[in-house]
Image (spheres, rainbow, N blue to C red):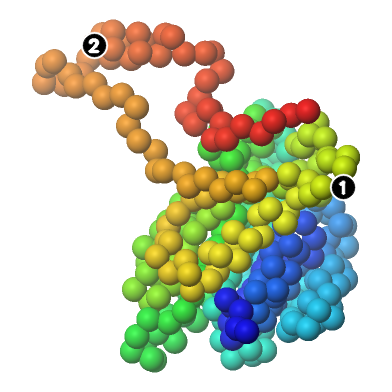
Amino acid sequence: MSLPLDGLSAIVTGAGRGLGRAEALELARLGASVVVNDYGRPGRDGSGEASATPAEEVASQIRTAGGSAVAHHGDVSDFASARGLVELAVTSYGKLDILVNNAGILRDRMVFSMTESEWDSVIRVHLKGHFNTTHFASVHWRERSKAAGRPVYGRIVNTSSEAFLAGSAGQPNYAAAKGGIVGLTTSTALALAKYGVTANVICPRARTRMTEDVFAGFAEPVNGGLDPLAPEHVSPLVGYLASPAAAKVNGQLLVVHGGMVAIVERPRVAAKFDTSKEAFSYEELDGLLTSHFAGRAENETFGATEVLALKRD
């Protein structure tokens, strides 16, 4: 019996642990040949010595289960390394069909305490890392499409976070990077559609090394059931978005966790004001906007209403 991703090849970045690992295993289970990328630094802040071990272990697990996988332990935030990653997929499997961007680090700090290096490093790994791999994958797909004279098969699944939607006081770098990834995804979706490529972005909630502090108050099941925050709740959606079945899903933002998927709409206008004169004056704006915002909570911001509630024990 054929599998949904038979004959397709995939790259998953940050796939040595956590979400990326679950996604790589799921794509392989669905029939894809997988390039498992992970830089292998042990610290969630990107610190420590780089290691080939995490990527090699996941690739080995896929091969042991009967799948096809190779490991890549380069840094996707490095332009040349990202080029090498895409070239490895093409060399190993003849072409690249699926790109899942997941690699990231955390360097949390309030905006008034954050250093330049803490800002730059998170933007570099998350946002630039997503761009680097997307750039080289899109070059590959565009060249193949032009050579064939028709659209080809291409899927991009990027990883954002609800931190960009609702804000995260101690993560201005992370929230900004994740917001940038959404913009990158929607732009890419428009640019590559004519070549047969789709690009979508997910906001997952999962208990991983990256989020151990965030979800510290959410109890794990005591009866041996699947943790609502297990990465295995996220990976099936990635498998679907990477599949032929998702051909008409493009430029979408989806929140996923605990057996739930929500499609997020683009922002809509909440209120509109027109001047009664030729142009607004300070006084007129004061009268309109001050009264409009007067009833809002002091800490309420754009997008601050949580997309979906998660029960805390």
| Residue position marked by numbered label 1 in the rendering | 224
**Residue 101 picture location, percent across and down:** 62, 63
Residue 271 picture quarter = top left
Residue 268 picture quarter = top left
Q: How would you rate the neighbour count of disc 1 (Cα within 10 Å): few for under 14, some for 14-19, many for 20 or more?
A: few
Badge 2 or badge 1: first in the primary sequence: 1
Above or below, comparing residue 45 to residue 287 in the picture: below
**Residue 84 picture location, percent across and down:** 65, 80
Quadrant location of the N terminus in the rendered image: bottom right
Q: What type is the residue that disc 2 sits on? A: Glu
> Which numbered marker is on residue 284?
2
Q: Nearer the viewer, mark 2 or mark 1?
A: 1
> Which residue is at a point 28% across and 8% down the rendered structure image?
287
> Which residue is at a point 24% across and 11% down the rendered structure image?
284
Decide which of 61, 142 is in the foreground and name it.
61
* Residue 178 in sight: no
State left or right for residue 230 relative to residue 285: right
| Element under disc 2 | helix
Decide which of 122, 18 is in the foreground and name it.
18
Quadrant location of the C terminus in the rendered image: top right
| Element under disc 1 | loop
**Residue 241 picture location, percent across and down:** 53, 64
State left or right for residue 258 relative to residue 265: right
Q: How would you rate the neighbour count of disc 2 (Cα within 10 Å): few for under 14, some for 14-19, many for 20 or more?
A: some
How far apart are labels 2 and 1 at the CA level? Answer: 61 Å
> Which residue is at a point 82% across and 47% down the rendered structure image?
225
Above or below, comparing residue 267 to residue 153 in the picture: above
> Which residue is at a point 26% across and 24% down the rendered structure image?
272
State left or right for residue 202 relative to residue 54: left
